Image (cartoon, rainbow, N blue to C red):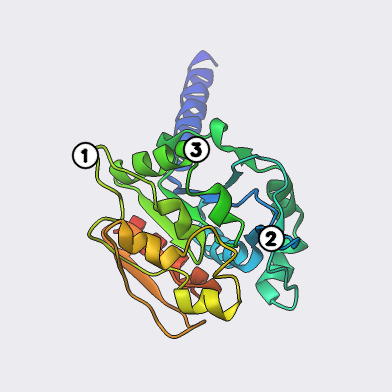
Amino acid sequence: MKTRFYFSAIALLFSIALIAQTKQDKPSVLMVLSSHQELGDTGKDTGYYLSEVTHAYEVFEANNYEITLVSPEGGNPPVDGFDLKDEVNNKYWNDATFQNKLQNTLKVSKVKAKNYDAIYYAGGHGTMWDFPNNKKLAKIAAKIYENDGVVAAVCHGPSALVNIKLSNGNYLVEGKTVSVFTNEEEANVKLENVVPFLLEDKLIERGATVDKAAMWQEKVSVDERLVTGQNPASAKLAAEKIVELLED
């Protein structure tokens, strides 16, 4: 009887250890959404762009990733690009689990870089105001990158990259090829004089080379462990590239 109990206890401990190891091995991605709602002095609202979250989220979920949503202020961030005719947007917007995460995003101060294999910055014009000078986010991204993780951003999400420096003092984007929301696309939506800076120009100032497609076409650049996408159409492919890098 005692022997049977002993072996049962050993089996239980082995199972717990196996589950813990499985959870530990499950890739984790930190998705960052803007908390900024005011579109400059226009009187209009902005925020994160919904499809740049959902289309990437779908890829990560399909690959069994742990997905954590975070925003500079935490809580329920403001949404832009709210198109429920988009099937992926509609699926997740009406999904209780996704909504629970979305309405309770973590504050950046609660995030530990060591827990994540990748950080993904979703776009939306709100990012132009609250991503570039967020020192805590920049440190998290730098640590993830230097821990052999992936840093990724789409559309205006690369505004988060403009001030990220690595431990050697160099900008993360220096000498790298990136794809970001272009000057032409900004002019096309008539916001080139509203945003605090032109993203394409700023990243070139930081030493990056911008590789771009025609306006609104899918375009993703991968340089080492930096993945960047030009516009909303690039979110899915950017997420797929993150998965490829982490599986290598």
The image quarter in which residue 139 lies: top left
SS type, badge 1: loop
- Spot occupied by residue 130 in the image (x, y as percentages of width and height): 57, 48
Q: Is residue 208 above or below residue 108?
A: below
SS type, badge 3: helix
Q: Mark 2: few, some, or many residues within 10 Å (few <14, many ≥20)?
A: many
CA gap between label 1 and label 3 equals 38 Å
Residue in the image at 38% along x and 78% along y = 212
Q: Is residue 241 visible?
A: no
CA gap between label 2 and label 1 equals 35 Å
Q: Name the N-terminal-most of marks 2 and 3.
A: 3
Residue type beneath disc 1? Asn
CA gap between label 2 and label 3 equals 42 Å
Tell how many labels. 3
Identify the residue under disc 2.
46
- Spot occupied by residue 197 in the image (x, y as percentages of width and height): 48, 60
Identify the residue under disc 3.
19
Identify the residue under disc 1.
168
Residue in the image at 56% along x and 67% along y = 193
Residue 51, label in figure: none
Residue type beneath disc 3? Ile
Q: Between residue 198 and residue 182, name the one nearer to us.
A: 198
SS type, badge 2: loop
- Spot occupied by residue 185 in the image (x, y as percentages of width and height): 51, 77
Q: Name the N-terminal-most of marks 2 and 1.
A: 2
For the C terminus, give its image quadrant: bottom left
- Spot occupied by residue 117 in the image (x, y as percentages of width and height): 40, 46
Mark 1 and mark 3 in contact? Answer it, CB < 8 Å.
Answer: no
